[in-house]
Image (spheres, rainbow, N blue to C red):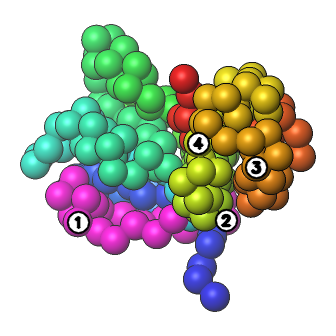
Amino acid sequence: MPDVTPTVFVVDDDDSVREALEGLIREAGLRPQMFATAREFLSHTHVTCPSCLVLDVALPDLNGLDVQQRIVAEHAHIPIIFITGYGDVPMTVRAMKAGAVEVLTKPFADETLLNAIRAALERSAGAIDQAAEIQALQERYASLSGREREVMALVVTGLMNKQVAGELGISEITVKAHRGKMMRKMRANSLADLVNIAAKLGISH
C-alpha cells in the first residue's frame, strides 16, 4: 500500500529554516520533504496524495513566483504557502491572485503556518477528489457509442425525444433506446444529473 500521509514540501535555501520547519511539520503528524533549491523540488517525482508546498520567495536558482507558475500548470493539486523575509505588497498580490493559500512574512508563529498548511492540505484533498471524479466521468463518456454521444449532446440542451429524432433523422423509439443505454453508462438517474455531468465534462451547445 502506498503511503498516503499528507506531505508538506518545503523549499528554502536556509539550512536552519528547513531544520526548524521539518521538526514542526513532523510534530504535527505530517510528512515533511525538504529541498534546498526549486530545481531539486521540481525534478522530484510527485505522487497524488494530499500535499502542499511551503515555498521561500527568494531562492538562489528560481524566483518563487516562477516556481508557482510551473506548479499550477503541472501539479494543480499542490497548493502553495509562500514565506518571505520581507513584506512585498505587489509580490503578495501576484501570489494570491495566482492561487497561493497564504503569504507569510518571517518571523511567523508556528501555529500561523500550521493553520495555513491545514487549509492547503484540505484544498489539495478536494482537488484530488475532483480530478478523480472527472476522470471517472471521462471514462464513462468514452464508453458511449458515437450515436449515444450525439443523443446526449442534444438531450442536455433540453430537446425532447421527438425533437432529437428529428435532428438525427432516426425514429423516436431508436432515440429512446440510445438514451436509455447512454443514461445507464453515464450512471445518470435524471436529466438534471445528465446536465450536471455534461457541464463537468465541458459538453455544451
The magenta region covers 24-48
Residue at 63% over, 70% down: 5
Q: Residue furthest top?
A: 89
Identify the amino acid type marked 2: Gly
Residue on which the image places disc 2: 29
Mark 3 → mark 4, Cα distance in angstroms: 13 Å
Residue on which the image places disc 1: 43
Mark 2 → mark 4, Cα distance in angstroms: 50 Å
Task: Provide residue 202's location: percent of width, then percent of height.
Answer: 54, 35
Residue on which the image places disc 4: 150
**Is the C-beta separation of discs 2 and 4 under 8 Å?**
no
Mark 4 → mark 1, Cα distance in angstroms: 43 Å
- Graded by Cα atoms within 10 Å as few (under 14), some (14 to 19) or many (20 or more), the crowding at tag 1 reads few
- For marks 3 and 4, give the one nearer the viewer: 3
Identify the amino acid type marked 3: Thr
- Graded by Cα atoms within 10 Å as few (under 14), some (14 to 19) or many (20 or more), the crowding at tag 2 reads few
Label of residue 23 in the image: none
**Is the C-beta separation of discs 2 and 1 under 8 Å?**
no
